[in-house]
Amino acid sequence: MSFLVEENPAKHRFEILVDDALAGFTAYLPRGEVLVFTHTEVDDRYQGQGVGAALVRGTLDQVRARGGRVVPRCPFVAAFIERHPEYADLVVDAP
């Protein structure tokens, strides 16, 4: 199973493709260099396979690479960051 995380700026979300099929997304509201994450969804067919974690990890890695910051309003994103403190430096208060 191969994962690819790509930003879809037109839809304000990052999407994960599993073997070239859309498997989920995490939506955000852009606030300058800060992205406010509001919702994460993974297709039922991919539940319990690490797709959600791969999506959030790939998303946060891309945000870090471009010098951005995040506000994790989405409970899934917030829980991921809590479990992976190496991403805590990306979190800021809502702008």
Image (cartoon, rainbow, N blue to C red):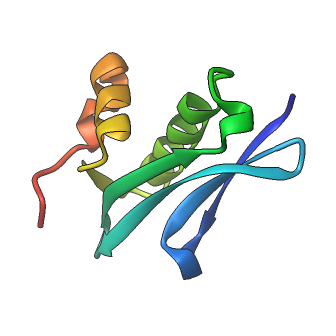
Instruction: Please count the marks in the image.
Output: 0
Question: Relative to the observer, which residue lies in front, 2 or 90?
Answer: 2
In the rendered image, the vertical position of residue 41 relative to residue 2, given as above or below: below
Quick one: which residue is furthest to the bottom in this view? 10
Could you tell me residue 86's position as x and y percent? 35, 23
Q: Residue at x 57, y 82 (%)?
A: 10
Quick one: which residue is furthest to the front in this view? 44
Q: Residue at x 38, y 28 (%)?
A: 80
Could you tell me residue 89's position as x and y percent? 25, 36
Q: Which quadrant does the N terminus fall into?
A: top right
Q: Residue at x 68, y 22 (%)?
A: 49
Q: Splitting the image into 4 quarters, where does residue 90 fall?
A: top left
Side of 89 relative to 59 (left or right): left
Could you tell me residue 54's position as x and y percent? 61, 32
Q: Residue at x 71, y 33 (%)?
A: 46
Side of 74 relative to 93 (left or right): right
Could you tell me residue 57's position as x and y percent? 52, 35
Q: Splitting the image into 4 quarters, where does residue 83 fall?
A: top left
In the rendered image, the vertical position of residue 15 relative to residue 60, given as above or below: below
Q: Which quadrant does the C terminus fall into?
A: bottom left
